[in-house]
Image (cartoon, rainbow, N blue to C red):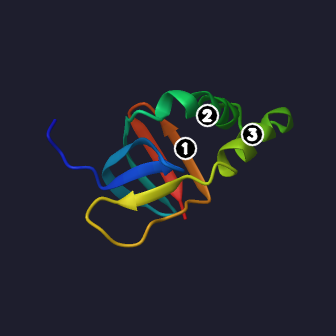
Amino acid sequence: MGETAAYEVWHGDSLVGSLCDVSVDQPWFLGRFVPGAGWAELSPLFAAQEEARREQFPEHLSGALAAVRDLGVELRPVAGGDSIRPWMIYLTEGRASFRY
């Protein structure tokens, strides 16, 4: 594909993946997620969060949202600049959305 990532997604010292083709659909930022080395460890948490979203956030799945929020992932701009700590982020292989 050859495009350059706009952001790298980090969890501590682990590169979770990259965000490409980032656009804005207020209040969300949307993009394509390309998994990195740290994705395997976190993907179950994001999968549970996605299930909660698909089911319209039932009470019994609220822990999935908190688990991802509490990760404190950081988006680091590839071109330089200040990092972003999204307060809400959804990642699946091929898709990303976040708010900050």
Q: Is residue 37 above or below residue 8?
A: above
In primary-sequence order, the first of circles 1 and 2 is 2
Q: Residue at x 36, y 45 (%)?
A: 18
Badge 2 amino acid: Glu
Residue 46 position in % (x across, y down): 59, 35
| Residue name at image x 67 percent, y 51 percent | 69
C-beta proximity under 8 Å, tags 1 and 2: yes
Q: Mark 3 belongs to which amino acid?
A: Phe
Residue 20: give x, y in percent of width and height: 30, 47
Residue that sits furthest to the right in the current view:
59
Identify the residue at image location x=16%, y=35%: 1
- Callout 2: SS: helix
Q: State the residue position of label 1.
A: 90
Residue 52: x and y in percent read 70, 34
Disc 3 secondary structure class? loop
Residue furthest out toward the bottom: 81
For residue 57, which numbered disc appears in the image? 3
Q: Which residue is label 2 attached to?
A: 50
Tag 1: amino acid: Tyr
Quick one: label 1 or label 3, which is nearer the N terminus?
Answer: 3
Question: In whole angstroms, how far apart are the C-alphas of marks 1 and 3?
Answer: 13 Å
Q: Nearer the viewer, residue 76 or 94?
A: 76
Q: Quadrant of residue 45?
A: top right
Q: Pinpoint residue 41: horizontal percent, then vertical percent.
A: 56, 30
At a point 47% along the width and 35% down the height, the residue shown is 38
Comparing marks 1 and 3, which lies closer to the viewer? Answer: 1
Left or right of residue 73: residue 79: left
